[in-house]
Amino acid sequence: MSFSRLSFSLPSSPLLSSSLLLSSLRASSLLTSALLPPSFGFPSRFLLSAVLLSAVLQSAVLIAVILLAAVLLSVVKLKENIVDATPKLADMMQVRIRNYNLIGNTTKQIGVVAQELETVFPGMIDETPDRDAEGNDLGTTTKSVKYSVFVPMLIKAIQELKAEFDAYKASHP
């Protein structure tokens, strides 16, 4: 199913909107206080607070849209051919979990390498064309991982492990 064919709107709720705005204002105020000493004047503090508020609001809206999309796409009315998933444990055991840092950044991260994961789960990889600042196609692509797809696979693998453990317990009282 293509996301571009789905259409939905966020519910309009004054309570939700004012709550989000109030939380964002508090967060930007706290960040401003933490980042700028009191010796900085009002214009500097106000400008930083406005920038931080914008960033916090954008992040909150993005998270809300992602969560809403996940909820909407999980309803039965959008699905057909529903059957139990095939076993995933053996395949999950082939996934290499790696420590790494992004080029130009020393922050250590944990995750997978798209090209490695693609050999086990090709459907978990997206590929997008690389574009320059003007939007021109550079003729190369970048692969990314659909991490949200890991969740149901991990649940399935845990269920398999639990069944194996229960069978072992039953045969070894």
Image (tube, helix red, strand yellow):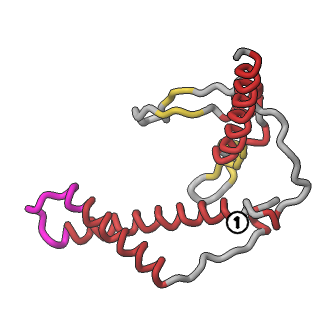
- 26 lies left or right of 140: left
| Image height of 35 relative to 161, above or below | below
Residue 108, can we see it?
Answer: yes
Q: Nearer the viewer, residue 111 or 49?
A: 111
Query: Which quadrant is the C terminus positioned in?
Result: top right
- 72 lies left or right of 52: right
| Image height of 141 relative to 98, above or below | below
In the rendered image, residue 84, in percent from the top left (x then y), is placed at: 85, 44
Q: Amino acid at mark 1?
A: Leu
Give the residue displayed 46% in from the left and 66% down from the top: 58
| Furthest residue toward top | 172
Give the residue displayed 60% in from the left and 61% down from the top: 66
In the rendered image, residue 25, in percent from the top left (x then y), is placed at: 32, 71
Q: Nearer the viewer, residue 28 or 151?
A: 151
Neighbourhood count class around disc 1 (C-alpha, 10 Å): few under 14, some 14–19, many 20 upward: some
- Residue 79 shown in magenta: no
Q: Which residue is mark 1?
A: 72
In the rendered image, residue 12, in percent from the top left (x then y), is placed at: 56, 82
Tell me the magenta residue range.
32-44
In the rendered image, residue 147, in percent from the top left (x then y), is placed at: 64, 44
Q: What kind of element bears circle 1? A: helix
Quarter of image, res 19:
bottom left
| Furthest residue toward right | 81
